[in-house]
Every structure is written in C-alpha cells, then in structure tokens.
Image (cartoon, helix red, strand yellow):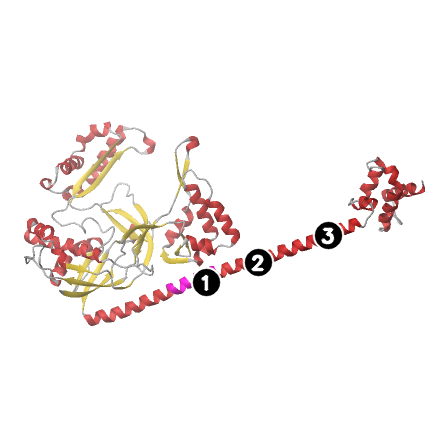
Amino acid sequence: MKNYRLKLTALTPIHIGTGEVYEPTNFIIDDGWLYEFDEVLFFKHLPQNKRFEFSKLTTLQSNTGYELFEKIHAFVLQNKQYAKDVSVNKVKVSKAIEQHYKKSIAKKVQSEGKGRDQKSVFNRFEIQKTQRLANNVSTFLTGSSIKGAISTAFQEFIYKRDGKGKMNKLFEKDKLFKNLSISDSIAQKADSQIGYAVNQERFETEDDAQISTFIEVNSQGSEYLVTLSIKNFRNDDNQTMSEEITKEKIVEACNSHYQLLFNDKERTIRLSENQFLLSIGKHSGARAVTVDGLRKILVKLAQISNKKDEGDDSEKRVERLHKKSYFENEMIRELFAKFESLNDKEQRDWKNAKQFIESPSDLEELVKQRKSLTINAILTEETTIWKFSETKDSSSGNSFGWVLCEFIDEETFEKTLKSFNQYGKELIQSHTKRQKEILESIAKEKEKQKKLALEKAEREKKEAEEKAKKEAEEKERLASMTPIQRLVDSYDDIAVLINDMKIGKIENFEVIKQELAKEVKKELQKNPKTWEKAKQKALKRKEYIESLLEE
C-alpha cells in the first residue's frame, strides 16, 4: 500500500450538505452573525416571568403551526440577548442576508385556502447547513466526497483512452476504486459563512430570472489535510487488474476533466506537477459529475404558460413559444446529446426539444390545447450555473465546490498538521470556554431566580405577619369599644354619619341618640374647623349635635 499526503485549499465556497437546516426557532441573526442556540438552554436562561410567558405561547392553538411559529420567533427576537448568551455556534452572515432576515422573518408571504378556512403562510427562513465536526467547532471535508470527484475524472480518463467497454469493466466489474481510500480531513484551518446560492442562466434568458436559496458554505480559503492510500490492484476474484491507480494518473485525469470547467466557470489557473483540481459538494454542476462523451443531462428548456394576468390565452402562449424558441435557437443547438445514445423516453424528449428549437410551429396546436407545456431536452451541458454570493446578484459570486489539491511531502505535512492542530486546539478551547460560560450563566441566573424567590417568600411572610398583627390590633381595638363607638368608627366621613342620623338611617336612633351625639361631638372636636371654628355646613352639623345633647 502506498500512502500520500494531500493539502486541499478551497478556491471557492464549498457546501457538503447534511440534510439539516438552521431553523429560526433556534437561531437569530444580529450584528453580522448567526447565533445558533439550544432551545432548552434558552428556556433555562430566561427569568421566571419570561419562562411563564414562553410556556403560555407553546400551549396556543394554531391551525397550521405558522401562527405559533410567528409568535415564538417574535418572542425570541424580543429576548435575543438571552439567545445570544447561550449560543452554541456562531456563523458569519452577509449584510444582505441580515437585512433580508430582519425584513422578512416570520412575515406572512401568502394565504392558503378560502373563506373561513383561509390560513396564513409565513416565511420560515431556513438555511441549509454545511457539514461540521461532531464538536461543532469547524467544517471538514469527507473522504467520500473527494474520492467521488476523483472517480468521475478517472472514469473519463479511461473512457477517452480505451472506450466505454474498458471503463465499465474496470469500474463496474473489477471495482477499480476499491483500491483507493481517502480519509476525511485529518485537520483543517477552516471557517464557514452564510449567503445566497443563486441559480444563474449560462445563456442569458428573456427575463433573466434567478432562483436563490439561503446556504452555509465552507469559506473560500479554508484548508484541509487528508491521507490518500492506494492498495494492491486485485479484483474480487483475486486477479491482478489491467489498470493501476497512480499519483501521476490522478493528477492527469483530474486536471484533464476539471481544469477546462474551472477556466470556464472561474478563471485560468496555473498548476504545478503535484497539483490538481477537484469540484466537490452540492451545486458542482452536471458537467463536473459526469463523463464527457457520455453526458445525458435533462434540462427544462421552457415551460410555456400564461402569466397570471393573461388568463387562458392560447395566442399569448403561442407568441411566448416562438419568442422563447427563437432565443434558445443559437444557444442550445450544438448541445444536444447524440440521439442514438438515448432510451425511448429520452428520445421523445429529444424530438420535442428539437421541434421547439428548429420548428416551433409544429408545436403550436399542442400549446393551444394545453394551458402549460414543458419542453425538456437531453443535452451535453447544463444551461444554468449555481453561484455563492453575499447578495442575490450572482455576477459578484463564485461557482461552488472548487478545490486545489496538492501532494505534499511528509515534512511539509507534519509542519502543516502542527499548525492546523494548534488552530483546532484554540477553537476547541474557545468552544469549551464558551460552553462553560453558558453553564455558569445559567447557574448564575438560576441562583438569581432562587434568591429572588427567597426574597419574595420572606417579603410575603413579613407582609402576612404584619397583616395578622394589624388585624389582631384592630380586633382588640374594636373589642375595647362600646357598640356606639364602633358605629362611629365604621364611618370614614363623620359628615355622612350626621346626615344618616338626620334622615333616620341609624337603627334604634331614638334610643341611642344622646350617647351617639356625645361620641360624634368628640370626633368633631378633634378638628377646630368642624367644632370651635365651624362655619356654614360644619356649623350646621355642630348645631344639630348640640340640639341632640340639649334634649
């Protein structure tokens, strides 16, 4: 077995998909960064009153789940500092992405259904994740992605040299590439960022419409180290194969396959004898992952249908058919796959596409009869290219997945490995420190809440004791009074009592009026204005009490 060391450098952004996404209920975007947080830690970090508020939200009923999502995300945004405090991952985002997020997240984008059954649909703002190490501190490259890219180039190398039969025997029967193994990246000095994946027409279209999605990528300039191992060349029957994989053949095959594509998509590049190009990951493009000479790329050339404001207008569809076919004519004519290499279904698509390009009038009746007609072609090249861009404008972006690979000697490998390991160690230390800070922050908040709860309990206990004391004192005070004194005490306003006395609202008044008048006089004498210096109404009340005492 021969082992080789490879250093890989990302010439353009790379996306190795996992099928996972960043969901806005576990991230926020603020100040140029995406902060990914654990929902449980976020909840634990909240003050008690906010926990209660959040718990109430999760019990709300929702027809579609969208309304609940809107309310939960609004809550997260209002409490973003708590989310940032417990973030477990932090990824750089472009300014355009942040603006897009703040403008559209959780906003209604359309409605489903009609009348009372109508439901709102909200922008979920999901972002495709790139592959990361288990500890989440860095991106990495999988050996399978690298091996797959080399395999495609090597198949083309054999096909062009010896034909399809030899290629199929080596790869399908003998399984030549079982003898090649490539490790996942052993160490890396890598970063990631978030932007737009923009689908751009290679041949400018009538309206130049572009599709875009949100995506995380291994950043341009990221570096990786891998080991490439070549084993003994024996097939499953233990027979020696007629072909060997060598370092030199890998370089030749990969540069033969990928360099022209790189020149077409990016720029001209000069390579040393130990260097070769690869295109890996999502959005590499159909040419990168197929063998030149055997390509059968299914492409939708057009979908002829009316625009929303045109209704079912067959003449408009025919007009669009001719416009579109005229535009595509010169661009696509030379890209059709060989008819004899196609199966029956592919040949039918091929014929329709030829008619569309060369004589669209043959399709007029079909277009008139159908509200929508899709024209597929079997081509040797894709008609669009995906680019990573910080904005929705693909002209400022780079194509995906380009990697410069270089065979390096053991001394260079060890030196680079040491440097990368130190970089990784610092990342892990920073990550560990961050995890510790999160736990300490949660513990601190928990202790704070505990202290507040104890203080509240102590305060409530004290208040209860004071209330009980006052109630006991009040009970004792009332017990020391005569019934007449308790009657006078029950009135907050002595003037109201005197008025009730005048109008006969006091029970047994004739029996108690003398004693009652004495108690009322005592109360009035407490204030000079209601007795000694009484005037007008106060004077009349004084005179009334005196009249009762004189009886």
Q: Nearer the viewer, mark 3 or mark 2?
A: 3
Tell me the CA gap for discs 1 and 2: 21 Å
Looking at the picture, how far across and down is residue 440, in whole percent? Answer: 46, 63
Q: Earlier in the sequence, mark 1 or mark 2?
A: 1
In this picture, which residue range is highlighted in magenta?
Answer: 431-442
Which label belongs to residue 472? Answer: 3
Q: Which residue is mark 2?
A: 454
Residue at disc 2, secondary structure: helix
Name the amino acid, label 3. Answer: Ala
Name the amino acid, label 2. Answer: Leu
Q: Earlier in the sequence, mark 3 or mark 2?
A: 2
Residue at disc 1, secondary structure: helix
Which label belongs to residue 440? Answer: 1
Looking at the picture, how far across and down is residue 153, in whole percent? Answer: 14, 55
Magenta span dominant secondary structure: helix
Residue at position x 51%, y 49% in the image: 52
Crowd rating for badge 1 (residues with CA inside 10 Å; few <14, some 14–19, many 20+) = few
Looking at the picture, how far across and down is residue 247, in whole percent? Answer: 13, 63
Crowd rating for badge 2 (residues with CA inside 10 Å; few <14, some 14–19, many 20+) = few
In magenta stretch: residue 432: yes
Looking at the picture, how far across and down is residue 381, in whole percent? Answer: 17, 46
Relative to 86, say whether 500 is above or below.
Answer: above
Quadrant housing residue 343: top left
In magenta stretch: residue 360: no
Q: Is residue 339 left or right of residue 298?
A: left
Relative to 427, say whether 520 is above or below.
Answer: above
